[in-house]
Image (cartoon, rainbow, N blue to C red):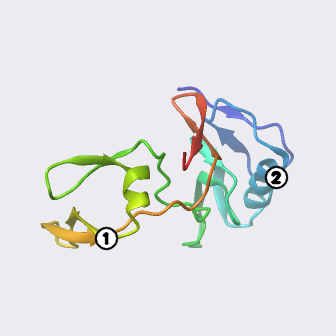
């Protein structure tokens, strides 16, 4: 998949694999990040890039002599409502259905040592119609 450099004035270039244009707030956020003094080479925008907090969700920021652990845009684990989740009962359910249960359920989980265990989980809707890009087409997160 080819990338395109965004035509914005920043100390480091912003390269986009998104195949869609950015909204003005997204462009400003990309400019802000690409202007940080410790950005190494360029900022990369992945196909799922969308507005975050401080950094665009779906951006990759390589740094030199710095670590910025919060530069993930604060949208980790965004899924659409039709995403199937396998439960320990052997069945898979759409995420939107699990969120409607408003209770815990048992899923398979992985421990820090890589062991598969049963664990309690819950699902909840965090945002509606948040723009994301999937396979080159605009989709909405949280449907």
Report whether 96 appears left or right of 121.
right
Report whether 63 appears left or right of 38.
left
Question: Do we see residue 39 in this rendering?
Answer: yes
- Residue 93 versus residue 4 in the image, above or below: below
Q: Nearer the viewer, mark 2 or mark 1?
A: 1
Instruction: Kindly report the distance in space between the C-alpha atoms of the residues bearing marks 2 and 1.
Output: 37 Å
Residue under numbered circle 1: 104
Q: Nearer the viewer, residue 27 or 51?
A: 51
Dot 1, crowdedness within 10 Å: few (<14), some or many (≥20)? few
Q: Nearer the viewer, residue 140 or 116?
A: 140
| Secondary structure found at label 1 | loop
Report whether 77 appears left or right of 67.
left
User: Residue visible at 77% across and 56% down?
Assistant: 29
User: Residue visible at 58% across and 26% down?
Assistant: 2
- Earlier in the chain: of badge 2 and badge 1, it is 2
Residue 26 lies, in percent from the top left, at 76, 50
Residue under numbered circle 2: 25
Quarter of the picture holding the C terminus: top right
Residue 96 lies, in percent from the top left, at 44, 51
Q: Nearer the viewer, residue 78 or 41?
A: 78
User: Residue visible at 17% across and 66% down?
Assistant: 114
| Secondary structure found at label 2 | helix
Residue 6 lies, in percent from the top left, at 76, 38
Dividing the picture into quarters, in which one does residue 98 lie?
Answer: bottom left
Dot 2, crowdedness within 10 Å: few (<14), some or many (≥20)? few
């Amino acid at each position: 998949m080819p990338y395109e450099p965004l035509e914005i004035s920043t100390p480091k270039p912003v390269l986009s694999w998104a195949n869609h244009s950015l909204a003005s707030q997204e462009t400003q956020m990309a400019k802000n990040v690409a202007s940080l003094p410790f950005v190494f080479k360029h900022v990369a925008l992945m196909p799922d890039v969308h507005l975050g907090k401080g950094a665009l969700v779906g951006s990759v920021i390589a740094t030199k002599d710095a670590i910025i652990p919060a530069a993930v845009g604060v949208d980790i684990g965004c899924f659409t409502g039709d995403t199937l989740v396998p439960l320990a009962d052997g069945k898979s359910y759409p995420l939107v259905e699990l969120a409607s249960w408003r209770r815990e359920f048992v899923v398979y989980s992985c421990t820090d040592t890589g062991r598969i265990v049963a664990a309690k989980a819950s699902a909840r809707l965090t945002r509606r119609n948040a723009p994301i890009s999937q396979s080159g087409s605009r989709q909405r997160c949280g449907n």
